[in-house]
Amino acid sequence: MNQALGISFEEVAEDFTPLVTGMIKRLRIYKNQEEFMQVGFIALWKAYERFDDTKNVPFSSYAYITVKGEMQEQLRKDSVYEERYTPSDFERAPEPPAPDMESLYLELDSLRPYLDRLTPREQDWVLEYSIHGRGIKEIAGRFHVSPHTVKDWRRSALRKLRM
């Protein structure tokens, strides 16, 4: 029992239930209302425990400020969580379909005059990168070489293709 108030928390909770429900309406909380009821009663408990009557502030005002502050803080936390962990439209979009064999052959035919100037490994890099869209680590894993080796293939292939 809080000595300054002289009543038990159960009585305070019963008396201030309209404050908690009213705060939910005032802050326009439309989802997770049960969770915010709990947040409100926990805030009311904190106000009950910390209340000091020597500061010339009525308990009702102190409770109002504490409940409102805790609910606003929870709203902010929920907003940050949703922003961070809700997938964006890009992440929800379906993956584009794999290219069909006909389009792959067309791409190969367009690259063939340039590939003749390259070594077989440089050709592997060009095909894996441009047609299959694989990165350096994927190509390295596919050919059982280090990423540094794949970077060398890329560097020499690009140098030859620019000439």
Image (cartoon, rainbow, N blue to C red):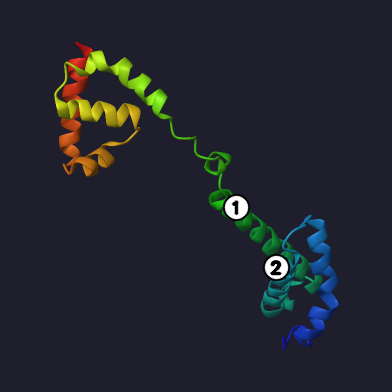
Q: Residues within 10 Å of mark 1 (few under 14, many from 20)?
A: few
Q: Is residue 147 left or right of residue 7?
A: left
Residue sitting nearer the eye, 27 or 53: 27
Residue identified by numbered label 2? 35
Residue drawn at 32 percent across, 36 percent down:
134
Residue in the picture at 17% in, 37% down:
148
* Real-space CA distance between mark 2 and mark 1, rounded to the nearest whole angstrom: 16 Å
Observer-nearest of 40 and 158: 158
Q: Nearer the viewer, residue 96 or 50?
A: 96
In the displayed structure, 145 sits above or below 49; it is above
Tag 1: amino acid: Glu
Q: Residue at x 39, y 28 (%)?
A: 101
At numbered mark 1, what does the secondary structure look like: helix, strand or loop? helix
What quarter of the picture does the C terminus occupy? Answer: top left
Quadrant of the rendering where the N terminus is positioned: bottom right
Location of residue 93 in the rendering, given as x and y in whole percent from the top left corner: 56, 40
**Which of the marked residues, 2 or 1, is nearer the chain's N terminus?**
2
Tell me the tag on residue 143: none
Q: Position of residue 20 (x, y in %)?
A: 79, 68
Which residue is label 1 attached to? 82
Question: Which sits in the foreground, 32 or 95?
Answer: 95
Q: Position of residue 127 (x, y in %)?
A: 28, 28
Image-quadrant location for residue 3: bottom right
Amino acid marked by disc 2: Glu
Residue lying furthest top in this view? 163
| Quadrant in the picture for residue 94 | top right
